[in-house]
Image (cartoon, rainbow, N blue to C red):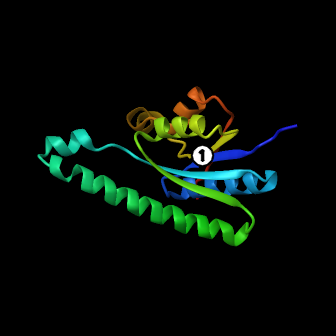
Amino acid sequence: MIKLTRVVCPTDFSPTSSRAVDYAGTMADSFGAELVLLHAIPLMDYPLRSFGMSSSIEHIQEELQTRAMESLEVRSKKLKETLPNINVRLLVRNGEPHEATLECAKSENADMIVMGTHGYTGITHALLGSSAEKVVRLADCPVLTVRTPDE
């Protein structure tokens, strides 16, 4: 028997990750598990320093964290409209999305990660890489990837 007590779902607020949040919410609700919604903010230290903006780095990171938490709260409220009994916790972490997702899943003792994948192929995949692919390869727990079909 599969037992889920905690599901981690990273989101970048795209339509694909929004669909993954819906899947994660439904699974968490069905199993009575806690849903941890996560947003990762990539560190901008190097790019900003190269433009002489080192004094602004902390301010920009704080602003991004505030806006990310506000967006997570909006998403959580929307989820609770259809799943009123769901237990949702919101986290914002700094770092590359795949690293933040893996660290969160480990520190939260997640039973599953549910995340969107954009399904890039060819040169786009080679240039952009895939956070979902990295998470699938490196996670200690099962990972469910959700792709939004082309419309």
Specify the quadrant of the image occupied by residue 135: top right
Q: Residue at x 52, y 35 (%)?
A: 103
Residue on which the image places disc 1: 115
Question: Residue 112's spot in the image, x, y percent?
Answer: 68, 40
Frontmost residue, 57 versus 145: 57
Q: Please name the amino acid that badge 1 sits on.
A: Met
Q: Residues within 10 Å of mark 1 (few under 14, many from 20)?
A: many
Q: Residue furthest right?
A: 1
Q: Left of 29 or right of it: where is 41?
A: left
Q: Left of 45 or right of it: where is 148?
A: right
Vertical placement of residue 73 versus 99, above or below: below
Vertical placement of residue 93 versus 139, above or below: below
Q: Residue furthest bottom?
A: 81
Q: Quadrant of the C terminus?
A: bottom right
Q: Residue at x 70, y 38 (%)?
A: 111
Q: Residue at x 55, y 42 (%)?
A: 119
Q: Quadrant of the N terminus?
A: top right
Mark 1 secondary-structure assignment: strand
Q: Left of 100 or right of it: where is 1?
A: right
Question: Residue 55's spot in the image, x, y percent?
Answer: 16, 50
Question: Residue 57's spot in the image, x, y percent?
Answer: 23, 50
Can you see residue 86? yes
Q: Residue at x 25, y 56 (%)?
A: 59
Q: How many marks on residues?
A: 1
Can you see residue 130? no
